[in-house]
Image: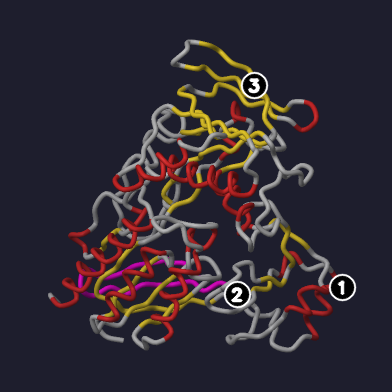
Amino acid sequence: MSKAILVVGGGFAGLTAAIEAAELGHDVYIVEKSPWLGGRVAQLNKYFPKLCPPSCGLEIQFQRIRKNPRVKFFTMADVVGLAGSKGSYTVRVRLRSRHTAPHAVDFNLLASSLVGEADNEFDFGLSKRGALYKSMPFAFPDRYVLDTPTLSKTDATQAERAKFLDLSEQPREIELDVASIVVATGWKPYDVTRLTNLGAGKVKNCVSNMQMERLASPAGPTGGRIVRPSDGRTPHSVAFVQCAGSRDQNHLNYCSYICCMASLKQCLYIAEQNPDAEITVYYIDLRAPGRYVNVLEKVQALPNVCFVKGKVADVVQAGDDKVTLTVEDAVRGEKLTLHYDLVVLATGMQPSLAGENPPLPLPLDEDGFIAGGEEAGIFAAGCARMPLDVTRTAQSGTAAALKAVQTVKGR
Protein backbone atom coordinates (compact mmCIF):
# COMPACT_ATOMS: atom_id res chain seq x y z
CA MET A 1 0.00 0.00 0.00
CA SER A 2 1.69 3.21 -1.16
CA LYS A 3 0.94 6.68 0.15
CA ALA A 4 -1.32 5.12 2.78
CA ILE A 5 -2.95 6.88 5.71
CA LEU A 6 -2.86 5.48 9.24
CA VAL A 7 -5.83 5.98 11.53
CA VAL A 8 -5.13 5.29 15.20
CA GLY A 9 -8.42 4.45 16.88
CA GLY A 10 -11.50 2.66 15.54
CA GLY A 11 -14.25 4.65 17.25
CA PHE A 12 -16.70 6.94 15.48
CA ALA A 13 -14.10 9.58 14.61
CA GLY A 14 -11.56 7.04 13.41
CA LEU A 15 -14.08 5.10 11.33
CA THR A 16 -15.32 8.30 9.73
CA ALA A 17 -11.81 9.48 8.91
CA ALA A 18 -10.80 6.10 7.48
CA ILE A 19 -13.89 5.72 5.30
CA GLU A 20 -13.75 9.28 3.99
CA ALA A 21 -10.08 8.92 3.03
CA ALA A 22 -10.62 5.51 1.44
CA GLU A 23 -13.60 6.71 -0.59
CA LEU A 24 -11.38 9.48 -1.93
CA GLY A 25 -9.13 6.76 -3.33
CA HIS A 26 -6.48 6.35 -0.61
CA ASP A 27 -5.31 3.20 1.14
CA VAL A 28 -6.02 3.29 4.87
CA TYR A 29 -4.93 1.28 7.89
CA ILE A 30 -6.98 1.37 11.10
CA VAL A 31 -5.21 0.37 14.32
CA GLU A 32 -7.60 -0.26 17.23
CA LYS A 33 -6.54 -1.39 20.71
CA SER A 34 -9.80 -3.17 21.64
CA PRO A 35 -11.04 -6.43 20.05
CA TRP A 36 -13.73 -4.68 18.00
CA LEU A 37 -14.34 -1.44 16.14
CA GLY A 38 -16.97 1.03 17.35
CA GLY A 39 -15.42 2.77 20.34
CA ARG A 40 -17.49 4.30 23.13
CA VAL A 41 -20.57 4.72 20.93
CA ALA A 42 -20.95 0.92 20.90
CA GLN A 43 -21.42 0.97 24.69
CA LEU A 44 -24.29 3.45 24.64
CA ASN A 45 -27.97 2.60 24.80
CA LYS A 46 -28.88 5.51 22.49
CA TYR A 47 -27.04 8.50 21.12
CA PHE A 48 -27.87 11.98 19.90
CA PRO A 49 -29.18 13.60 17.79
CA LYS A 50 -31.87 11.04 16.90
CA LEU A 51 -31.60 8.94 20.07
CA CYS A 52 -31.11 5.80 18.02
CA PRO A 53 -29.22 2.68 19.18
CA PRO A 54 -25.50 2.49 18.35
CA SER A 55 -26.05 -0.23 15.76
CA CYS A 56 -27.97 2.35 13.70
CA GLY A 57 -24.88 4.39 12.80
CA LEU A 58 -22.13 1.84 13.34
CA GLU A 59 -23.62 -0.85 11.10
CA ILE A 60 -23.59 1.64 8.22
CA GLN A 61 -19.92 2.39 8.88
CA PHE A 62 -19.09 -1.32 9.12
CA GLN A 63 -20.82 -2.00 5.80
CA ARG A 64 -18.82 0.76 4.13
CA ILE A 65 -15.60 -0.81 5.45
CA ARG A 66 -16.63 -4.30 4.29
CA LYS A 67 -17.25 -3.00 0.78
CA ASN A 68 -14.08 -0.95 0.49
CA PRO A 69 -10.92 -2.95 -0.26
CA ARG A 70 -8.79 0.13 0.47
CA VAL A 71 -9.47 -0.15 4.22
CA LYS A 72 -7.48 -2.64 6.24
CA PHE A 73 -7.90 -2.79 10.01
CA PHE A 74 -6.07 -4.37 12.92
CA THR A 75 -7.80 -4.92 16.28
CA MET A 76 -6.13 -5.70 19.61
CA ALA A 77 -3.31 -3.62 18.17
CA ASP A 78 -1.11 -0.83 19.53
CA VAL A 79 1.25 1.60 17.88
CA VAL A 80 4.62 1.05 19.56
CA GLY A 81 7.06 2.91 17.37
CA LEU A 82 7.40 5.58 14.70
CA ALA A 83 10.27 6.48 12.37
CA GLY A 84 10.57 8.86 9.45
CA SER A 85 8.95 12.20 8.79
CA LYS A 86 5.88 13.81 7.26
CA GLY A 87 5.02 12.07 4.01
CA SER A 88 7.12 8.97 4.75
CA TYR A 89 6.55 7.27 8.10
CA THR A 90 7.27 3.70 9.14
CA VAL A 91 4.98 2.69 11.99
CA ARG A 92 5.55 -0.34 14.22
CA VAL A 93 2.33 -1.98 15.40
CA ARG A 94 2.13 -4.69 18.04
CA LEU A 95 -0.68 -7.22 17.56
CA ARG A 96 -1.82 -8.92 20.75
CA SER A 97 -2.98 -12.54 20.70
CA ARG A 98 -6.69 -13.21 20.15
CA HIS A 99 -6.14 -17.02 20.16
CA THR A 100 -9.12 -17.59 17.83
CA ALA A 101 -9.26 -18.35 14.11
CA PRO A 102 -9.04 -15.38 11.73
CA HIS A 103 -12.62 -15.86 10.59
CA ALA A 104 -16.04 -15.88 12.23
CA VAL A 105 -16.56 -19.07 14.26
CA ASP A 106 -19.56 -19.67 16.51
CA PHE A 107 -17.98 -20.50 19.87
CA ASN A 108 -21.19 -19.97 21.83
CA LEU A 109 -21.51 -23.58 23.02
CA LEU A 110 -17.87 -23.86 24.07
CA ALA A 111 -17.90 -20.41 25.67
CA SER A 112 -20.93 -21.30 27.82
CA SER A 113 -19.23 -24.48 29.06
CA LEU A 114 -16.17 -22.69 30.45
CA VAL A 115 -16.26 -21.74 34.14
CA GLY A 116 -13.55 -19.07 34.42
CA GLU A 117 -14.88 -15.52 34.80
CA ALA A 118 -13.62 -11.94 34.83
CA ASP A 119 -15.22 -8.51 35.13
CA ASN A 120 -16.80 -7.49 31.85
CA GLU A 121 -15.00 -4.34 30.72
CA PHE A 122 -17.67 -3.62 28.12
CA ASP A 123 -20.29 -3.37 30.91
CA PHE A 124 -17.96 -1.36 33.17
CA GLY A 125 -17.85 -4.15 35.75
CA LEU A 126 -21.64 -4.53 36.07
CA SER A 127 -21.43 -8.11 34.77
CA LYS A 128 -19.01 -10.98 34.35
CA ARG A 129 -17.72 -12.44 31.12
CA GLY A 130 -16.20 -15.81 30.39
CA ALA A 131 -12.70 -16.60 29.20
CA LEU A 132 -14.00 -17.02 25.63
CA TYR A 133 -16.14 -14.00 24.89
CA LYS A 134 -17.64 -11.55 22.42
CA SER A 135 -18.94 -8.71 24.56
CA MET A 136 -20.14 -6.43 21.77
CA PRO A 137 -23.55 -7.64 20.50
CA PHE A 138 -22.96 -6.60 16.87
CA ALA A 139 -19.21 -7.08 16.99
CA PHE A 140 -17.07 -6.16 14.02
CA PRO A 141 -15.00 -8.13 13.35
CA ASP A 142 -17.39 -10.92 14.29
CA ARG A 143 -14.79 -12.86 16.23
CA TYR A 144 -14.47 -14.16 19.77
CA VAL A 145 -11.52 -13.45 22.05
CA LEU A 146 -9.89 -16.04 24.28
CA ASP A 147 -8.54 -14.52 27.51
CA THR A 148 -6.10 -17.24 28.55
CA PRO A 149 -5.37 -15.92 32.10
CA THR A 150 -9.09 -16.34 32.91
CA LEU A 151 -9.13 -20.05 31.97
CA SER A 152 -9.40 -22.54 34.80
CA LYS A 153 -7.38 -25.76 34.54
CA THR A 154 -10.42 -27.60 33.23
CA ASP A 155 -11.14 -24.76 30.81
CA ALA A 156 -7.59 -24.90 29.50
CA THR A 157 -7.91 -28.61 28.75
CA GLN A 158 -11.12 -28.01 26.82
CA ALA A 159 -9.61 -25.07 24.95
CA GLU A 160 -6.52 -27.05 23.94
CA ARG A 161 -8.72 -29.71 22.34
CA ALA A 162 -11.02 -27.25 20.58
CA LYS A 163 -10.79 -26.56 16.88
CA PHE A 164 -10.08 -23.01 15.75
CA LEU A 165 -8.39 -22.06 19.05
CA ASP A 166 -4.65 -21.56 19.37
CA LEU A 167 -3.45 -21.18 22.96
CA SER A 168 0.16 -20.94 21.81
CA GLU A 169 -0.38 -17.87 19.62
CA GLN A 170 2.14 -15.16 20.49
CA PRO A 171 2.01 -11.38 20.04
CA ARG A 172 3.78 -10.13 16.93
CA GLU A 173 4.83 -6.87 15.35
CA ILE A 174 4.29 -5.53 11.86
CA GLU A 175 5.49 -2.40 10.07
CA LEU A 176 3.27 -0.06 8.08
CA ASP A 177 4.50 2.57 5.61
CA VAL A 178 2.26 5.62 5.67
CA ALA A 179 2.37 9.23 4.53
CA SER A 180 0.15 10.78 7.20
CA ILE A 181 -1.57 9.86 10.44
CA VAL A 182 -4.98 10.57 11.97
CA VAL A 183 -5.08 10.13 15.74
CA ALA A 184 -8.60 9.34 16.93
CA THR A 185 -7.84 7.71 20.25
CA GLY A 186 -11.08 8.92 21.82
CA TRP A 187 -11.89 9.24 25.50
CA LYS A 188 -12.23 7.28 28.70
CA PRO A 189 -14.64 7.89 31.58
CA TYR A 190 -12.95 9.69 34.44
CA ASP A 191 -11.90 7.27 37.17
CA VAL A 192 -14.85 7.48 39.56
CA THR A 193 -12.91 5.81 42.37
CA ARG A 194 -11.03 9.10 42.74
CA LEU A 195 -14.31 10.83 43.66
CA THR A 196 -14.21 9.55 47.22
CA ASN A 197 -16.66 12.13 48.58
CA LEU A 198 -19.24 11.08 45.98
CA GLY A 199 -19.35 7.45 47.05
CA ALA A 200 -17.82 6.01 43.90
CA GLY A 201 -16.59 2.47 44.47
CA LYS A 202 -17.97 2.40 48.03
CA VAL A 203 -21.72 2.96 47.77
CA LYS A 204 -23.63 -0.01 46.32
CA ASN A 205 -26.22 1.89 44.33
CA CYS A 206 -24.08 4.74 43.07
CA VAL A 207 -23.21 4.28 39.38
CA SER A 208 -21.50 6.31 36.68
CA ASN A 209 -23.33 7.69 33.67
CA MET A 210 -21.69 5.09 31.39
CA GLN A 211 -22.80 2.31 33.73
CA MET A 212 -26.32 3.73 33.42
CA GLU A 213 -26.02 3.43 29.63
CA ARG A 214 -25.21 -0.26 30.01
CA LEU A 215 -28.11 -0.80 32.43
CA ALA A 216 -30.50 0.79 29.92
CA SER A 217 -29.15 -1.12 26.92
CA PRO A 218 -31.13 -4.17 25.75
CA ALA A 219 -27.76 -5.86 25.23
CA GLY A 220 -26.55 -4.86 28.71
CA PRO A 221 -26.25 -6.86 31.93
CA THR A 222 -29.95 -6.51 32.85
CA GLY A 223 -31.48 -6.79 29.39
CA GLY A 224 -32.28 -3.08 29.41
CA ARG A 225 -34.04 -2.95 32.80
CA ILE A 226 -32.82 -0.02 34.89
CA VAL A 227 -32.43 -1.57 38.32
CA ARG A 228 -30.33 -1.16 41.43
CA PRO A 229 -27.07 -3.14 41.18
CA SER A 230 -27.38 -4.27 44.81
CA ASP A 231 -30.67 -6.16 44.57
CA GLY A 232 -32.08 -5.86 41.04
CA ARG A 233 -35.04 -3.79 42.20
CA THR A 234 -36.52 -0.94 40.19
CA PRO A 235 -35.49 2.42 41.73
CA HIS A 236 -38.37 4.74 42.65
CA SER A 237 -36.14 7.72 43.45
CA VAL A 238 -33.08 8.61 41.38
CA ALA A 239 -30.61 11.47 41.75
CA PHE A 240 -28.23 12.71 39.06
CA VAL A 241 -25.07 14.43 40.27
CA GLN A 242 -23.78 16.73 37.53
CA CYS A 243 -20.14 17.77 37.07
CA ALA A 244 -18.93 14.75 39.05
CA GLY A 245 -15.23 15.54 38.96
CA SER A 246 -15.53 18.06 36.12
CA ARG A 247 -14.78 21.77 36.49
CA ASP A 248 -12.71 20.82 39.49
CA GLN A 249 -9.01 21.64 39.82
CA ASN A 250 -8.49 18.42 41.77
CA HIS A 251 -9.91 16.27 38.96
CA LEU A 252 -10.94 17.52 35.48
CA ASN A 253 -10.38 21.24 35.14
CA TYR A 254 -12.85 21.67 32.28
CA CYS A 255 -16.47 21.10 31.23
CA SER A 256 -16.90 17.79 29.41
CA TYR A 257 -19.60 19.23 27.12
CA ILE A 258 -21.82 16.14 26.90
CA CYS A 259 -22.51 15.28 30.57
CA CYS A 260 -25.65 17.42 30.90
CA MET A 261 -27.12 15.99 27.72
CA ALA A 262 -26.26 12.45 28.80
CA SER A 263 -28.13 12.95 32.08
CA LEU A 264 -31.16 14.46 30.31
CA LYS A 265 -31.23 11.47 27.98
CA GLN A 266 -31.03 9.11 30.95
CA CYS A 267 -33.90 10.93 32.67
CA LEU A 268 -35.95 9.97 29.62
CA TYR A 269 -34.79 6.35 29.93
CA ILE A 270 -36.05 6.18 33.51
CA ALA A 271 -39.29 8.05 32.86
CA GLU A 272 -40.14 5.71 29.97
CA GLN A 273 -39.56 2.59 32.05
CA ASN A 274 -41.06 3.86 35.30
CA PRO A 275 -43.30 6.94 34.92
CA ASP A 276 -43.81 7.05 38.71
CA ALA A 277 -40.12 7.36 39.53
CA GLU A 278 -39.05 10.62 41.18
CA ILE A 279 -35.95 12.05 39.50
CA THR A 280 -33.82 14.92 40.78
CA VAL A 281 -30.97 16.53 38.84
CA TYR A 282 -28.41 18.43 40.93
CA TYR A 283 -26.43 20.83 38.77
CA ILE A 284 -24.08 23.80 38.81
CA ASP A 285 -25.02 24.94 35.31
CA LEU A 286 -26.97 23.16 32.58
CA ARG A 287 -25.49 22.99 29.10
CA ALA A 288 -27.74 22.12 26.14
CA PRO A 289 -25.94 23.44 23.05
CA GLY A 290 -27.79 24.33 19.85
CA ARG A 291 -30.79 22.21 18.98
CA TYR A 292 -30.35 20.13 22.14
CA VAL A 293 -32.22 22.82 24.06
CA ASN A 294 -35.36 21.04 22.85
CA VAL A 295 -34.35 17.98 24.88
CA LEU A 296 -33.79 20.12 27.97
CA GLU A 297 -37.23 21.67 27.59
CA LYS A 298 -38.81 18.23 27.13
CA VAL A 299 -37.23 16.87 30.31
CA GLN A 300 -38.02 20.02 32.30
CA ALA A 301 -41.67 19.56 31.33
CA LEU A 302 -41.84 16.07 32.84
CA PRO A 303 -43.88 16.19 36.08
CA ASN A 304 -41.60 13.75 37.92
CA VAL A 305 -38.27 15.46 37.16
CA CYS A 306 -36.95 18.18 39.46
CA PHE A 307 -33.89 20.36 38.82
CA VAL A 308 -31.99 21.71 41.82
CA LYS A 309 -29.14 24.19 41.37
CA GLY A 310 -26.61 23.16 43.94
CA LYS A 311 -23.39 21.22 44.46
CA VAL A 312 -23.46 17.77 46.02
CA ALA A 313 -20.93 17.60 48.82
CA ASP A 314 -21.26 14.01 50.00
CA VAL A 315 -22.70 10.64 48.91
CA VAL A 316 -22.78 7.86 51.51
CA GLN A 317 -24.32 4.44 52.05
CA ALA A 318 -27.58 4.38 54.01
CA GLY A 319 -29.71 1.55 55.37
CA ASP A 320 -31.76 -0.75 53.11
CA ASP A 321 -29.30 -0.09 50.28
CA LYS A 322 -30.43 3.52 50.09
CA VAL A 323 -28.02 6.32 49.21
CA THR A 324 -27.79 9.54 51.22
CA LEU A 325 -26.90 12.81 49.53
CA THR A 326 -25.75 15.97 51.24
CA VAL A 327 -26.31 18.92 48.92
CA GLU A 328 -26.60 22.67 49.02
CA ASP A 329 -29.65 24.22 47.33
CA ALA A 330 -27.98 27.37 46.01
CA VAL A 331 -31.27 29.11 45.18
CA ARG A 332 -32.94 28.61 48.56
CA GLY A 333 -29.69 28.78 50.51
CA GLU A 334 -30.43 25.48 52.27
CA LYS A 335 -28.29 22.48 53.10
CA LEU A 336 -30.24 19.29 52.37
CA THR A 337 -29.79 15.65 53.38
CA LEU A 338 -31.91 13.36 51.20
CA HIS A 339 -32.23 9.64 50.47
CA TYR A 340 -32.43 7.93 47.08
CA ASP A 341 -32.72 4.42 45.68
CA LEU A 342 -30.12 5.10 42.98
CA VAL A 343 -27.55 7.82 42.33
CA VAL A 344 -25.96 8.48 38.94
CA LEU A 345 -22.67 10.36 38.76
CA ALA A 346 -22.29 12.42 35.58
CA THR A 347 -18.58 11.72 35.25
CA GLY A 348 -16.69 13.58 32.57
CA MET A 349 -14.71 12.72 29.47
CA GLN A 350 -10.99 12.30 29.87
CA PRO A 351 -8.85 11.88 26.73
CA SER A 352 -7.56 8.33 26.39
CA LEU A 353 -4.02 9.66 26.11
CA ALA A 354 -4.15 11.37 29.51
CA GLY A 355 -1.48 9.87 31.74
CA GLU A 356 -0.09 7.84 28.84
CA ASN A 357 3.25 8.09 27.05
CA PRO A 358 2.21 7.79 23.39
CA PRO A 359 4.89 6.66 20.90
CA LEU A 360 3.76 9.32 18.42
CA PRO A 361 5.25 12.85 18.65
CA LEU A 362 2.08 14.40 20.00
CA PRO A 363 2.03 17.64 21.98
CA LEU A 364 -0.56 17.24 24.72
CA ASP A 365 -2.06 20.01 26.79
CA GLU A 366 -2.22 19.81 30.58
CA ASP A 367 -5.45 17.78 30.41
CA GLY A 368 -4.15 15.23 27.90
CA PHE A 369 -5.87 16.53 24.76
CA ILE A 370 -3.81 16.73 21.55
CA ALA A 371 -2.73 20.32 21.01
CA GLY A 372 -0.83 20.20 17.72
CA GLY A 373 1.17 17.91 15.47
CA GLU A 374 -0.23 19.02 12.12
CA GLU A 375 3.14 20.32 10.95
CA ALA A 376 4.35 16.71 11.17
CA GLY A 377 1.43 15.35 9.13
CA ILE A 378 -0.32 14.03 12.25
CA PHE A 379 -3.93 15.18 12.71
CA ALA A 380 -6.15 14.78 15.77
CA ALA A 381 -9.83 13.90 15.45
CA GLY A 382 -12.78 13.49 17.78
CA CYS A 383 -12.43 13.49 21.54
CA ALA A 384 -8.66 13.19 21.30
CA ARG A 385 -8.84 16.94 20.56
CA MET A 386 -11.64 18.07 22.88
CA PRO A 387 -14.90 16.81 24.40
CA LEU A 388 -17.46 16.35 21.60
CA ASP A 389 -20.81 14.73 20.89
CA VAL A 390 -21.16 12.07 18.18
CA THR A 391 -22.21 14.49 15.45
CA ARG A 392 -19.27 16.83 15.99
CA THR A 393 -16.99 13.83 16.40
CA ALA A 394 -17.93 12.63 12.91
CA GLN A 395 -17.37 16.12 11.52
CA SER A 396 -13.90 16.28 13.06
CA GLY A 397 -13.12 12.85 11.57
CA THR A 398 -14.00 14.13 8.11
CA ALA A 399 -11.87 17.25 8.63
CA ALA A 400 -8.87 15.20 9.77
CA ALA A 401 -9.25 12.87 6.77
CA LEU A 402 -9.17 15.81 4.35
CA LYS A 403 -6.00 17.18 5.98
CA ALA A 404 -4.38 13.74 5.85
CA VAL A 405 -5.29 13.40 2.15
CA GLN A 406 -3.78 16.79 1.40
CA THR A 407 -0.54 15.65 3.05
CA VAL A 408 -0.48 12.51 0.89
CA LYS A 409 -1.07 14.52 -2.28
CA GLY A 410 1.68 16.91 -1.27
CA ARG A 411 4.40 14.24 -1.09
> Where does the magenta region start and end?
77-96
Determine the CA span between mark 1 and mark 3. 50 Å
Specify the label residue 97 is tagged with.
Answer: 2
Q: Main secondary structure of the magenta part?
A: strand
Residue drawn at 36 percent across, 86 percent down: 68
Residue at 50 percent across and 73 percent down: it is 75
Residue 338, numbered label: 3
Q: Quadrant of residue 380?
A: bottom left
Q: Is residue 33 above or below residue 27?
A: above
Check the picture and name the quadrant holding the C terminus. bottom left
Residue type marked 1? Thr
Residue 328's x, y, as percent? 52, 17
Identify the residue position indicated by label 1 in the image.
154
Disc 1 packing (10 Å; few <14; some 14–19; many ≥20) = few
Look at discs 2 and 3 and give the one toward the viewer: 3
**Contact, CB < 8 Å: mark 2 with mark 3?**
no
Q: Is residue 78 magenta?
A: yes
**Which comes before the other along the chain, label 2 or label 1?**
2
